[in-house]
Image: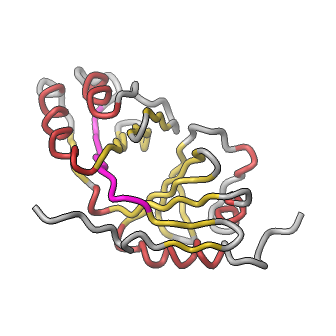
Amino acid sequence: MSDPVTALQGATFTGFATVREIGPLGMITLRAKPDARGLQSAIRDCTATEIPGQRQILHVGGRAAGWMAPDEYLLMLPYAETATALSSIAQHMAMSHHLAVAVSDARAVFRIEGEKADQVLAKLIPTDLAILPMGELRRTRAAQVAAAFWREGDGFTLVCFRSVARYVSDILASSAKIGSELRP
């Protein structure tokens, strides 16, 4: 198997906030009803977390489980462990209707960091970031493209489709240019 390559090979922009592509990350979309037999053990085995609640993302180390919809979860783990995780999910959920698909190579992931990281996203997404709690995952649009994001540490993590990675990187960088900070 060839080595994974991120969409923009780790592109970084530094302005009044830092925007950088991170990864490669292992990502699995898991579709199942929240009460499906084996769901909790499948998620715990892959991410060491519980089943996330509505609009919640749970982290343990470099792993996470996020709620994407009433029957959809995004599992994040080290890239090299994706195939093993899919096999584990299949075993835990063998008696339940579910769908588990690796989406690692179909997504791009960005970190927006720094004291004014919220200003970068505030220009692009229709969310009041002042009231967004730590641990809440939002699915929305970032300048008209589908994205999911959450507050983490001193910034935000944003996931989008790989096909629009260059566009998202460019709009994030443009939004973070020194001199374009939001004024109170």
- Camera-nearest residue between 27 and 111: 111
- Camera-nearest residue between 98 and 112: 112
Outermost residue, right direction? 184
Residue 127 vertical placement versus 50 (above, below): below
**x, y percentage for residue 6?**
33, 67
Using residue 169 as the reference point, say whether residue 3 is left or right of it.
left
Residue 23 located within the stretch drawn in magenta: yes
Q: Quadrant of residue 179?
A: bottom right
Q: How many marks?
A: 0
Residue 104 vertical placement versus 144 (above, below): above
Q: In which quarter of the image is residue 93?
A: top left
Residue at 34%, 41% in the rendered image: 75
**Which range of residues does the magenta coloring cover?**
22-32
Q: In which quarter of the image is residue 132?
A: top right
Tell me the quarter of the image containing the N terminus.
Answer: bottom left
Residue at 58%, 71% in the rendered image: 172
The image's colour scheme reads: secondary structure
Using residue 44 as the reference point, say whether residue 144 is left or right of it.
right
**x, y percentage for residue 80?**
22, 49
Residue 14 located within the stretch drawn in magenta: no
Using residue 2 as the reference point, say whether residue 124 is left or right of it.
right
Residue 123 vertical placement versus 69 (above, below): below
Residue 65 vertical placement versus 152 (above, below): above
Residue at 16%, 40% in the rendered image: 84
**x, y percentage for residue 65?**
40, 37
Tell me the quarter of the image containing the C terminus.
Answer: bottom right
**x, y percentage for residue 19?**
56, 67
Residue at 54%, 57% in the rendered image: 140
User: What secondary structure is the stretch in magenta mostly built from?
Assistant: strand
- Camera-nearest residue between 142 and 11: 11
